[in-house]
Image (cartoon, helix red, strand yellow):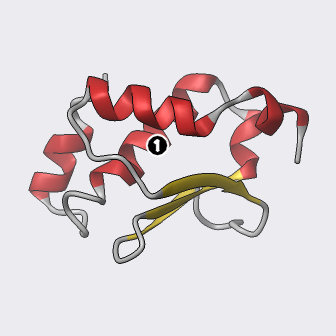
Amino acid sequence: MSEFERAVDVDQRARILAKRYSLPLPASIRFVDNQNSRWGSCSIDTREIRLSSRLANYPPWVLDYVIVHELAHLVVAGHDAEFHAIVARFP
């Protein structure tokens, strides 16, 4: 686990962002090292969110956007207009 991952409580960030943008909470959320072509992923059935540890190289607002994006998948599975309207709540 990197210094960034230890410093960032993604469970807390997810709780704050879910409340702020009226989104459901995941069953779990964590950093992973095996996502090289995605920033995050969401398993709808298990409600698990995984975030690329590469996010450590970007500003915190980028991590927050990815979390909101993945939380939105707990409402809408695909990337349709309804999904994008939910994600657009994030400035």
Q: Position of residue 36 (x, y in %)?
A: 71, 66
Q: Which residue is rendered at x = 46% and y = 43% of the image? A: 67
Q: Can you say whether 78 is above or below 3 in the image? A: below
Q: Can you say whether 90 is above or below 40 in the image? A: above
Query: Along the horizontal axis of the image, is 45 left or right of 59?
Result: left
Q: Position of residue 58 (x, y in %)?
A: 69, 32
Query: Along the horizontal axis of the image, is 77 left or right of 67?
Result: left
Label 1, secondary structure: give it.
helix
Query: Along the horizontal axis of the image, is 75 left or right of 27?
Result: left
Q: Which residue is rendered at x = 61% and y = 24% of the image? A: 60
Query: Along the horizontal axis of the image, is 44 left or right of 77?
Result: right
Check the picture and name the quadrant holding the C terminus: top left
Q: Can you say whether 1 is above or below 45 in the image? A: above
Q: Which residue is rendered at x = 50% and y = 64% of the image? A: 41
According to the image, label 1 marks what residue?
A: 67
Q: Position of residue 30 (x, y in %)?
A: 64, 53
Report the amino acid beneath label 1.
Ile
Relative depth, front residue between 6 and 64: 6
Q: Which residue is rendered at x = 24% and y = 69% of the image? A: 78
